[in-house]
Image: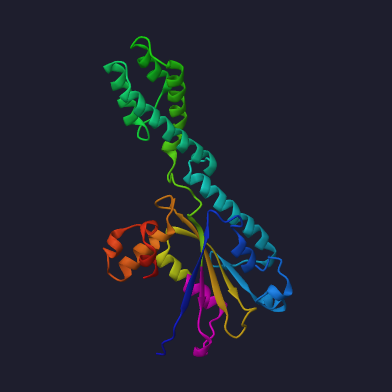
């Protein structure tokens, strides 16, 4: 049996990218490029095949598929943030951080032991348990006259609003998260082997099911308009893990390396975001 080299390159779409479907528009040949910018022959583009869930997609349906991908990314971004926008979650995080600083200050400067214990207990709840402003304020008022009561009342109400953060699966910024990914498969021309669109799709489907089953596959695009004699494939998948409910694709791929090469302690089991530049290059 002849052995050949199969090349696979990865390109990620991150949260900070404004055009999160740029790869898709190009793969569907829906992008508007000047002739000198094209790396393909438009007259051959009708020969391209887009597979979705194992079946070819009609060219007339590509615009709908593009809209579906865009909607899926938007919905998953909201889902991981408990249905809230990344901006609003950031505002709540800032408000909660400022409120915690106030609580610590009030613990240190409490006028009596009851008030000190109250703010200590409230501080322990932040980010862990729901805070009910009405109940907490009733208890605080029972201690007698409270200095700067209105300021403390406002802070406790703000902490109640921050209860919404308890529903957030990933409290970090989405700007550096991998929202979607593309795997580009090619066989070097030197091997003189051409794979049909059907076989490319079958191969990539098996690849996805084996290594990326927790991530939704958007489609596989087989391009015959760049080198008709040697088609290559673009496989697009979501960066959202349906099991962990987080955008954690780089961590998943790092764990794949640990598993495939039998190195469970590689990089001390650190997450991808914690790797140093030297570790990433390795």
Q: Give the vertical position of 217 relative to 105 (above or below).
A: below
- The image's colour scheme reads rainbow
The x, y position of residue 255, in whole percent, is 34, 62
237 magenta-colored: no
The x, y position of residue 266, in whole percent, is 29, 65
Q: Quadrant of residue 222?
A: bottom right
188 magenta-colored: yes
Query: Is residue 235 among what the camera can see?
Result: yes
Quarter that holds the N terminus = bottom left
Q: Give the vertical position of 132 relative to 62 (above or below).
A: above
Quarter that holds the C terminus = bottom left
Q: Which residues are magenta?
A: 183-204
Q: Give the vertical position of 86 relative to 148 (above or below).
A: below
Q: Give the vertical position of 141 relative to 58 (above or below).
A: above
Query: Is residue 85 among what the camera can see?
Result: no
Give the residue furthest to the front. 109
248, 60: nearer the viewer: 248
The residue at 30%/26% (across/down) is 120
The x, y position of residue 141, in whole percent, is 38, 13
């Amino acid at each position: 049996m002849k052995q050949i080299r199969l090349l696979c390159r990865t390109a990620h779409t991150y949260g900070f990218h404004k055009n999160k479907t740029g790869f898709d528009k190009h793969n569907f040949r829906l992008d508007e490029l000047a002739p000198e910018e094209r790396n393909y022959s438009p007259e051959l583009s009708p020969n391209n095949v887009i597979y979705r869930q194992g079946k070819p997609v009609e060219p007339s349906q590509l615009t709908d598929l593009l809209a579906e991908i865009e909607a899926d990314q938007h919905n998953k971004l909201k889902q991981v943030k408990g249905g809230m926008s990344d901006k609003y979650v950031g505002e709540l995080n800032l408000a909660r951080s400022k409120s915690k600083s106030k609580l610590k200050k009030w613990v240190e400067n409490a006028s009596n032991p009851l008030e000190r214990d109250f703010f200590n207990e409230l501080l322990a709840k932040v980010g862990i348990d729901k805070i009910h402003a009405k109940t907490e304020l009733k208890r605080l008022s029972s201690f007698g006259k409270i200095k700067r009561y209105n300021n403390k009342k406002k802070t406790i109400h703000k902490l109640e609003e921050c209860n919404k953060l308890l529903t957030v699966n990933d409290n970090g910024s989405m700007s550096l998260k991998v929202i979607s990914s593309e795997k580009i498969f090619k066989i070097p021309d030197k091997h003189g082997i051409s794979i049909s669109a059907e076989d490319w799709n079958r191969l990539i489907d098996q690849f996805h099911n084996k290594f990326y089953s927790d991530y939704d596959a958007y489609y596989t695009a087989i391009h015959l308009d760049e080198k008709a004699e040697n088609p290559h494939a673009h496989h697009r998948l979501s960066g959202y893990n349906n099991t962990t409910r987080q955008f954690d694709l780089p961590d998943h791929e790092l764990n794949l390396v640990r598993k495939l090469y039998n190195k469970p302690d590689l990089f001390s089991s650190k997450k991808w975001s914690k790797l140093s530049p030297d570790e990433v290059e390795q």
